[in-house]
Image: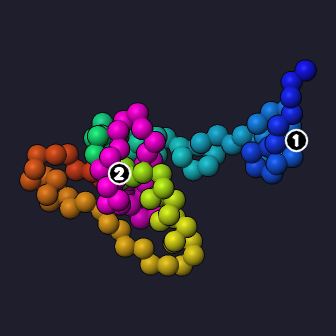
Amino acid sequence: MKAMRPCLDCGRLSYRTRCPAHPLIKTAQRGYGGDHQRARAGLQTMLPAPCAYGCGAWLTPSGDWVAAHVVDGDPSAGWVASCRSCNERAKRSRQAGWAVPQRLPNRDFLLMSGKRPDVVVPA
């Protein structure tokens, strides 16, 4: 017999990772549809690179990184590659109403150095 474990969302015991009240939601249903997936694929070709928030983390194609909106919640402004912790910190800060400076790399330096720009803008 399979052991019960706590639901990842509410902690109720279930035979699966989530209880019937909290089914797994697909990425497209959470707002990460085709545009986001294409942007992530485009950013992945630009890795390895440093986190766009300037924390010093080095992002690799197979590592734990995210395609973060340049302007939170506005995919039309484009995406940057960032480490998960910087992106989550920026989202929490904006949700709390704090002004968060966007410490994005200098695009002119990237272009002058022959490196590809780090921002992917939707077509």
Task: Indicate the position of residue 112 as horizontal and vertical percent values.
Answer: 9, 53
Q: Is residue 43 left or right of residue 24?
A: left
Q: Earlier in the sequence, mark 2 or mark 1?
A: 1
Q: Is residue 85 left or right of residue 26?
A: left
Residue denoted by label 2: 57
Q: Residue furthest bottom?
A: 98
Task: Indicate the position of residue 83 as horizontal and vertical percent values.
Answer: 42, 51
Other residues around mark 1 within 10 Å, as few (<14) / some (14–19) / many (≥20): some
**Residue ID at (41%, 42%):** 40
Residue 61, compared with residue 69, is above or below; it is above
The residue type indicated by label 1 comes to Leu
Other residues around mark 2 within 10 Å, as few (<14) / some (14–19) / many (≥20): some
Residue 52, compared with residue 48, is above or below; it is below
Label 1, secondary structure: give it. Answer: strand
**Residue ID at (32%, 46%):** 58
Instruction: Tell me if residue 40 is in the magenta stretch.
Output: no
